[in-house]
Amino acid sequence: MTDSIGKVVLAYSGGLDTSVIVPWLKNHYDCEVVCFCADLGQEEELDGLEEKAIASGASKLYIRDLREEFLHEYVMPTLQAGAIYEREYLLGTSFARPLIAKHLVEIAEAEAAQAIAHGCTGKGNDQVRFELTAMALNPKLRVIAPWREWDIRSREDALAYAAEFNVPVSASEKSIYSRDRNIFHLSHEGGLLEDPWNEPEESMFQLTANPEEAPAEPRVLEIGFEAGVPVQLDGETLPLVELFERLNRLAGEHGIGRVDMVENRLVGMKNRGVYETPAGTVIHTAHQALESICIDKYTLHYKDIVAVKFAELVYNGQWFTQLRSALSAFVAVTQKHVTGTVRMKLYKGNGRVTGRRSPFSLYREDYASFGEEDVYNQQDAEGFINLFGLPLKVEAMLALEGSTRSSYPAPDFSRFKRD
């Protein structure tokens, strides 16, 4: 036994790792274990969870339905920012962890617990996300990370420990894959995916149909937005939770939202992950299309720069930082007029935008037309080009005259010569 702690609140999913952590905490810290599970849309994964937690040795289990808070306060600000990690990952696990950790801290305070615990491995990103959140919200709480302390080193070890201490284990927990599911996405890691050359087996996927076997007829739908938030699906106004649930089913049936990537973890190693994000992929695409007609050029281009930093902050667990709050404030201003409707066609793994409209559209057909018009004088372009190209012209003239400037070599245009 390491030392004694009165009470620990454990972030509990009911999976193999967190289930064996319950008796391990009691054995090593002589403590009462209170479990907390965030309902983020895992659906059937929550069935029988309280009974399982108690059977594993916990004194009680809290379950909080955080789906609405998750979508409104974490998912949408990230989607509005256009944040995608390393060009592909929509951050489905990343922005869930700060929310779970926030409520974990709240329950620890309500229970007068001395510590919180999580089941994240010492190789992954989630340990950072949980612990940075705890530091930001209550730095006095002790954090216990069993994977950095115990002798369990494999799934087989965990199953043996569960058997030794009579922890109930379901068949799904013997799967070769490590999964994380919420209303936004489902991730898959481990097993044969550890070799990046292996193609994922089709039986692994749970939210999306095989695009090759998806319906032969496309599904056309319309998504309505208000200030950057989806509020309507095919003209019907829906709460955000219900909208995501419906769109997950529709997009999933057409095989939308699969991503297979090798990403750079925060701790320095590369990791392969396969993600299913049906509704999130469709909403991201539709939102981006609506922004293209509602946000001016310079704001949109700067917002693309912000998106990269925003994604990095979210991925690295830095949600509760001043910089992330500041960037969110900037993004919120850009969304003021992102209101309108986007039409999309879902077909065999692809979600294609086929139309967009907005009462705040900056797109002017009379300006963009190639036909006859009187709102744009094409001769004005000559003056613009002369001014825009003036620096190039000056440098070229100096080069032709053989002029030199100290520590600034004449430009070399040889690379532009044709063979």
Image (cartoon, rainbow, N blue to C red):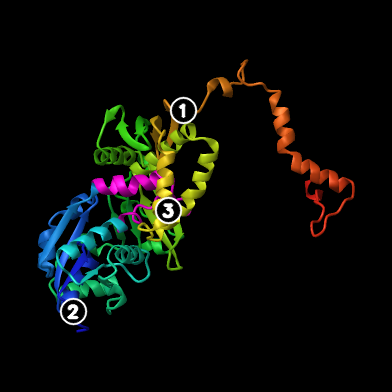
Q: Nearer the viewer, residue 378 or 93?
A: 378
Q: Which residues are magenta?
A: 68-97
The amino acid type of the residue labelled 1 equals Ser
Between the residue at mark 3 and the residue at mark 1, the CA separation in whole angstroms equals 35 Å
- Is residue 236 visible to the viewer in this orientation of the structure? yes
CA neighbours of label 1 inside 10 A, class few (<14), some (14 to 19), many (20+) = some
Residue where numbered disc 1 is placed: 361
Foreground disc of the pair 2, 1: 1
Q: Tag 1 or tag 2, which sits nearer the N-term?
A: 2
| Near-viewer residue (378 or 123) | 378
- Residue type, numbered disc 2: Tyr
- Quadrant into which the C terminus falls: top right
Front residue of 263/328: it is 328
**What is the quadrant of residue 145 in the picture?**
bottom left
Question: How many neighbours does mark 3 have within 10 angstroms: few (below 14), some (14-19), or many (20 or more)?
Answer: some
Kindly identify which residue carries mark 2: 29
Badge 2 density bin: few <14, some 14–19, many ≥20, Cα 10 Å = some
Q: Earlier in the sequence, mark 3 or mark 1?
A: 3
Give the Cα distance between marks 2 and 1.
61 Å
